[in-house]
Structure formats: C-alpha cells, structure tokens
Image: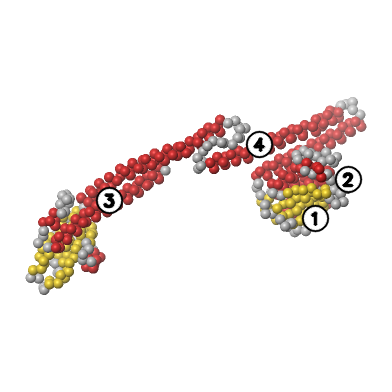
Amino acid sequence: MGLLFLGAMIGLYIAAGAYATLAADRSYDRLLFGSALSIMDTLSITQGRVEVDLPYASLDMLSAAPDDKVFYRVTGPAGETVTGYPDLPAPPERLVARARSSPEQPNFFDARYRGEPVRFVILARQIAQPGATGWVWTQVGQTKLARNALARRLVLSSLLPIAIVTLLALALVWLGIGRALRPLQAIGSEITAREPSDLRPIMASVPGEIAPVIDAMNGFMRRLEANIDGLRTFIADAAHQVRTPLAALLAQVEVAVDSRAEPDELRESLKAVQRNAEKLSRLANQLLSDATIRHRSDLHRFEDFDLLEVIRHAIRDAVPLSEDSDVRFSSSLKEAPFHGDALIIGEVVKNLIHNAFCHGSLGEAEVHISLERSENGYILQVSDRGPGIADAEKNRVFERFARGSSNCAGTGLGLAIVRQAVESHQGAVSLIDRPGGGLTVEILLPIAAS
C-alpha cells in the first residue's frame, strides 16, 4: 500500500507540474499576444513603405518579469526588417501557414536565441496599398525565467497538500489494516493456547473479509475431528473385538502345551486354535477393510475405470479358484465405464462374496453375481442360497458389529462396510429375499453422481 500511494503521489506531482507549466504559459502568452497586438496596431503605410511607431506600452506590459529579456521584430512584405532584431529565429512553416489562414489568431513557438530558451508569438496582417502589397509580420519573444519560476511556485504550492493527503491516507490504511488483522492475532493466540485435542470451532467475531478464512479453518477442523473420531472408533473396536479371540487362542494354546494332555485332547485344542486364528484373521481383515473404506471415502479421489474389470478382479481375489467354485458372474455388458474409487468398489464385492459364503451354506454354496445397466446407473446383485434375513433385522444388520440370526461366526462388519462404501458413491444398497430361498444384496451405483 505504501508503494501504491508513493506511485500515486509521483503521478500527482507530474500532473501538477504539467498543469503548472500550462497555466504559466497561458498567463505569459497573453502578455506576449497583447504586446504583439499593440505593435501591430501602430503599423502604417507611407509612400509604399511600412512604418511602425513602437509604443512604449507594448513592451511595458512585459516588465512584470524584470529578469526576462524581450525581443521583437517587424517584417515588411518583401521580407525586410522594418524594426527590431533582424536575426530572430524564423517561425516554423506550419505556423506561418496557420497565421495566413487565421490572421486574427496568435501562434506561439519555442526557440533558442542568444543561448537562452525564448517563447515567441507571431501575428500576420495582409496589406494592399499602392507600392506595398503582401504580408506584414510581427514577432515578439520573451525569455522563460519568469514563467518557469511561476510554474515552480505552483508545483511547490500543490506539492505540500499532496504530501499531507498521502501521509494521512497511509496512516489511515496502516491503522485500518492493523485493526482488520488484529482479530487474526487473537485467533492465533487462541489456537496456540488450545490443547491438541481441542478442535472446537472458532467463534470469535471477525470482519467480513476474514470470515471465509475462519469458515475454512472451522471446516478443516470438523473434518479433522471426524477423522480422529473414526480413528478412535477403529482403535476401540479393534481392542474390543480382538481381545476375545486372543484370550480364547491363548487358553487353547495353554491346553495344547500341557504335557499331560492326551493326543485326542491335544488335537481338539489345536483345532480350536486354528478356528480362533481363522476368526482373528477374518476380524483383522474386516477391520482393515473398514478403516480403508472410511479413509478413502473421506478423500473422495475418484477416477475413471471399467466396473466389469474391477468386479472380475475382486472375484479372483476373494475366490482364487473361482473356475472350480460355485461363484458365477454374469453380465450382458461388454464394458461398464464408471467414475469412482475402484479400490472401494472392489472391497464391496469381496465383502459380499465372503458374507454369501459365510451365511449361505445350507447344502449348496451357490453365489451368483450380476451387473446390469439401469436408467440411472448400474445395478450390482450378489445372491446366495442361505437362510436369508428376516424383515425385522434387515435394517439392523447394516450397523457395525451387528450379526444376523445365522450360525456363521462373522464379525458383523461386512454389510456396514458395504453401505458406507456405496453411500460414498451416492448409491443405495437394499436386501431382497431371493426366490427359491436365499438373499440378494442389490446395489445401485448412479452414473450421474459419480
């Protein structure tokens, strides 16, 4: 702001200098014109000769500038000098032409004479007398000491108000900016004094120009608090869910290492260890999948990919020997372009396959996966031949660690992960009873929202 006002001050100074020069020239040009006009009025023609009775008043009016020198010249029709200084600088041709077209108008020009800058005026009068026909020229000049001094006085007289106004404006800007930024200092002190876990919104009153910054900071702290809460929930869930299978695992290991245990008892203990280890492995995988979905849902880093290819890849990961298994995938689509998070969609498919295997094993573990195009997007269905889910439980099973009525020792995270992943793509998930027995999980992935 200081540089801006300094530049404005320099610009005003230059403008004031130009105006002062113009004002001084106009003032002294009027005196020059009056002097030349009074000389021109004394011209007379006597026996074909131009005569001038130089009046004292014609040059006396220029005496207001005592330090300046005055030069004059009257030229006859033949170009002869009637009176004055014969070596005065000739006026430019364009001024001569203008004077002949408008004799009543003065024409001014600057030139150097005897080593000094001089301001000249020329007047022309056409005569037509016996023996004397043509143009008579009057040229009067004055050095520029007085007019330059007047221009300097005008500039200096205007410079003081310009400087005062500039300094006042700078002071006001300094105070205004300081007052506007003072709330930021208070906010900085408030945030510095807070505990690391204190992510409450900043409620300080700030000017309207700073309000968007505070809103952005509050929004960032809300997102950070949500991430921290998610991390706390993950840690609490992990600690709670892992503790039980670990305790059982340790108990079975203690029985197995007991040297007094019979071989049959030892075999049963090892089977129990295996079951608890598998349960713990599934739980760890589900917890990590849940954490991944939460994290990537917050990032919302979507890219273009082929939904068909992602589903096939997820099936291969969930069921490595899918060719020999009861997992079947069908689709009438040759390609399914989609904009979203491929990793999240892949986790959805894997969790649904695991749930179908876990809850759908009643004599036949048939799992059917299909993908079709709808009016608004894609419809993904994963169907099994299990006992299904009662209508009263269909909403509850989407909660974290909520298990259905089946005998499968699941973690209760699968459908919760699926719902969060689908909602991050603005989709919807529903549970439908499968004709002939079983359950169908139907997912709508809208294309417009992606």
Badge 1: how crowded within 10 Å, few (<14), some, or many (20+)?
Answer: few
| Front: mark 2 or 1 | 2
Which numbered disc covers residue 362?
2
Q: Earlier in the sequence, mark 2 or mark 4?
A: 4
Judged left or right of residue 299, residue 99 is left
Q: Are marks 1 and 4 in contact (CB under 8 Å)?
A: no
Q: How is the image coloured?
A: secondary structure
Task: Name the residue: 36% across, 40% down.
Answer: 167
Task: Name the residue: 86% across, 45% down.
Answer: 387
Q: Secondary structure at mark 3?
A: helix
Q: Earlier in the sequence, mark 1 or mark 4?
A: 4
Coordinates of residue 297 in the picture (x, y in percent): 68, 44
Q: Amino acid at mark 4?
A: Ile
Residue sitting nearer the eye, 345 or 309: 345
Reading the image, the residue beneath label 1 is: 330
Quarter of the image where one finds residue 260: top right
Reading the image, the residue beneath label 3 is: 20
Cα gap from disc 3 to disc 4, whole angstroms: 70 Å
Q: Earlier in the sequence, mark 3 or mark 2?
A: 3
Q: Would residue 122 be seen by someone viewing this image from the given angle?
A: yes
Q: Are marks 2 and 1 in contact (CB under 8 Å)?
A: no
